[in-house]
Amino acid sequence: MAVILGIHDGHHSSAAIFVDSKLVAAFAEERLTRTKSEYGYPEKTIEYCLKEAGLIETDIDIVVLASISLPPKYHMAKRSTTFTIDDFWKEQEMYWYPKIYQNESPNYLEIFSDKRSKVKSQYDYSFLEDIDDTKGMLMSRIDLIKRKIGIAEDKIHVFEHQSCHAYYGYYWYGGNDEKFLVLTADGCGDGTNGSMWVG
């Protein structure tokens, strides 16, 4: 029996369990925390999916993680979870406009200091060089999975964001011998907001 745990730990965090290539459980963290667009490690969902599948953590053979690059600042502010429409507008005016058009370096976490959680993060931010260090954040994400699930690092596989979307569309369609086009359209994921694939 091969057990794969799939994790998305960005916005709309979620998890899924596959047993012998069959989806047996999938859920979104927001359903359990009751916080819309929950951001971060989906701990409650992983527990739920394992229970639904009748498995325990030591049964997991492989963990797959969606998205290579998640900006630490979004984790720290839980951007999608905590932001109001006014906050998204504020982000455009006070962060992106000065950064892109005025060649300034506004501090994201100073602008959104009120969004910082009072609860200590499960992520080890000592891996980070700064709040934009996506490589350090990836190391922190992998470290958290190793600590929480007790799985070796070589059993954790990370996949590019748009390819995850594309494969979902490909396998949902059912696949066959004909060639067909798969399109992804996204706000942004791993530096890209869209892609085209031939299946």
Image (tube, rainbow, N blue to C red):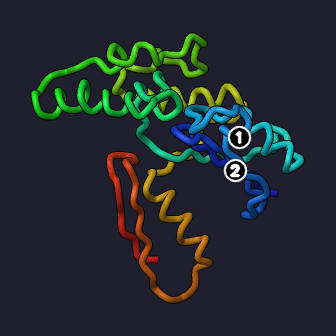
Q: Please state if 44 lies on the left or on the right of 145 as rendered.
A: right
Tell me, for residue 74, which label it has, or none: none
Residue 49 drawn at (x, y percent): 78, 45
Residue positioned most to the bottom = 178
Question: Percent x, y for residue 196?
Answer: 36, 69
Q: Residue furthest front?
A: 86
Q: Residue at x 37, y 17 (%)?
A: 109
Whole-number angstrom distance, CA of label 2 to CA of label 1: 14 Å
The circle on residue 31 is: 1
User: Is residue 28 visible from the viewing direction of this image?
Assistant: yes
Q: Amino acid at mark 1?
A: Arg
At which x and y percent is residue 17? 73, 51
Q: What residue is rendered at 67% in x and 44% in y?
A: 28
Crowding around mark 1 (Cα neighbors within 10 Å: few <14, some 14 to 19, many 20+) is some
Judged from this view, the residue extending furthest toward the right is 54
The answer, for residue 129, to whether it is visible in the render is no
Mark 2 = which residue?
A: 16
As helix, strand or loop, the secondary structure at mark 1 comes to helix
In the image: residue 89, left or right of residue 61? left
Q: Specify the quadrant that holds the N terminus.
A: bottom right
Q: Nearer the viewer, mark 2 or mark 1?
A: 1
Looking at this view, is 180 or 105 the one in front?
105
Q: Is residue 115 left or right of residue 172?
A: left
Q: Quadrant of residue 42?
A: top right
Mark sitting earlier along the chain (2/1):
2
Q: Residue at x 47, y 15 (%)?
A: 126
Query: Where does the image place residue 182, in percent across and percent down from the top left?
Result: 44, 72
194 is higher (above) or lower (below) than 62? below
Q: Residue at x 64, y 43 (%)?
A: 14
Is residue 172 rendered to the left or right of residue 161? right
Residue type at the position of mark 2: Ala
